[in-house]
Image (spheres, rainbow, N blue to C red):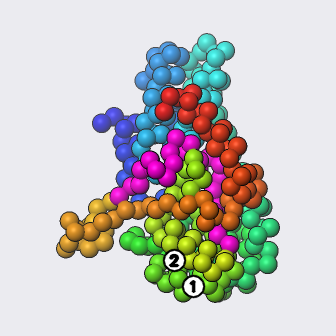
Amino acid sequence: MDWIEKKIDAIARDRNHGAAQLASSAIRILVSVCKRGRGKDLGQLASAVRQTALSLAKVRPSMAPIRNWSLVFSRRFHEKINDTTSLSEARQQGVLLGEELLAQQQRFVELQVKAARAILKNCKSLVTLSYSSTVESILRYGLPSSCRIVIAESRPLMEGRRLFKNLEHIFADLRVITDAQMGLAIPNTDLVLVGADTILADLAVVNKTGTYLSALVSHTHRRDFFVAADTYKINAAMDSGNCVLEAKSGRELWPQHEKHCDNVYFDITPAQLISGFVTEEGILDVAGMKPQVQKWQRLSQDFDI
C-alpha cells in the first residue's frame, strides 16, 4: 500500500469526523499528490490527480462532500494546467487550488451561519442530533446564547457528546439525551436542526441514524425540521432507491454478541419531511434545491460515474 492509498484508507476508517471535515482531508490528499506525486510529466501528474480523485469519490459512499470536492479539484486542476508547460508550475497550481477550495469551504460555512440567523433569531429551544461541524458553527455564531439546546448523543459512538463539550462554555441551558428520548424532547422545542452527510438526487437526506426518526416526530408535532448542508453535499448519482448506507461492526454495540448486532450508521430522511435546507445559497426548499441537483448531475456525467 503506497502513501496515497494509506491516506485514503485513513478516510475510510475515520469515525471521528463528519463529511465536511473528511472532504477537507480529501482536498489535502490531492494537494499532496500535486506536490510529491510520482508524475514525471504533465500527463502523468494529471492522470495521478484524476485517479486519486476517483478513488476518493468512492471511499465513503454515504458522504457526498468527499466525492464532490475531489471531483471538482480534479476538473479545475485540469483546466488550470491546460496552458502550462512546466511540471513545477503545475504542481504549484495544485497547491494554490487546494488553498482556494479550503477557503471556499470555510466561506460556505460563514454563509450558512448568515442564512440560519433568519430561522434562529426568535428560537428559544432547539433539538439536534450527533455531531456536525456545520451545525456547531451555526449554533455557536447564529443562535442566541439564552437558547436551550438539546443534543441527542447518537449511539453507538455518541458523537453528540463532542458537540456538548464544544458548546458548554457558550450556552447555559445545554442538555444531552439518548436518541430514544427525541420523541419526548421534540414536541417541546421550537425547531430541529441537523447536519447531513449526503443529499440524494430525490432530495432525501442521508445522515446519522436517528435523523429519520427525529424528522417523523417533528412532522407529527408540526415542528420545523431544517437540514444544514451546503450544495456540495448533493450526490446526484444516488437516490433513495439505490443509496448505499454504511454499516460497521456489531462490536460497537455489544462486543459479546457482535455477530447478532446490526450497526447501520446512516438512515434516509424523505424530502417531504424537510422544512428547508440551510445552504451557502440561503434557505432553500425542495424546489429551490432541484437546480443544484442538475448541476451535480452534469459533473457526474463528465467523470462517467
Relative to 51, is 147 above or below? below
> What residue is drawn where x is 39% and y is 55%?
246
Q: Which x, y percent locates residue 114?
A: 78, 61
Badge 1 density bin: few <14, some 14–19, many ≥20, Cα 10 Å: some
Query: Which residue does the numbered mark 1 point to in the structure image?
Result: 185
Residue 244 marker = none
C-beta proximity under 8 Å, tags 2 and 1? yes
Q: Which x, y percent locates residue 284?
A: 73, 56
Q: CA distance from mark 2 to mark 1?
A: 9 Å
- Residue 192 visible at all: yes
> What residue is drawn where x is 33% and y is 59%?
248
Query: Over which residues does the magenta segment extend?
Result: 224-247
Relative side of 88 to 190, left or right: left
Badge 2 density bin: few <14, some 14–19, many ≥20, Cα 10 Å: many
Q: Is 239 part of what is drawn in magenta? A: yes
- Residue 106 visible at all: no
In the image, 298 versus 202, the foreground residue is: 202
Secondary structure, mark 1, is: helix
Query: Which residue does the numbered mark 2 point to in the structure image?
Result: 152
Q: Quarter-wise, where is residue 78 in the image?
A: top right
> Disc 1 residue type?
Ala
Relative to 258, is 61 above or below? above
In the image, 186 versus 48, the foreground residue is: 186
Relative side of 123 to 29, left or right: right
> What residue is drawn where x is 79% and y is 78%?
122
Give the residue at the far top of this rendering.
Answer: 85
Q: Which x, y percent locates residue 204?
A: 56, 56
Q: Which x, y percent locates residue 212?
A: 51, 67
Q: Quarter-wise, where is residue 150 in the image?
A: bottom right
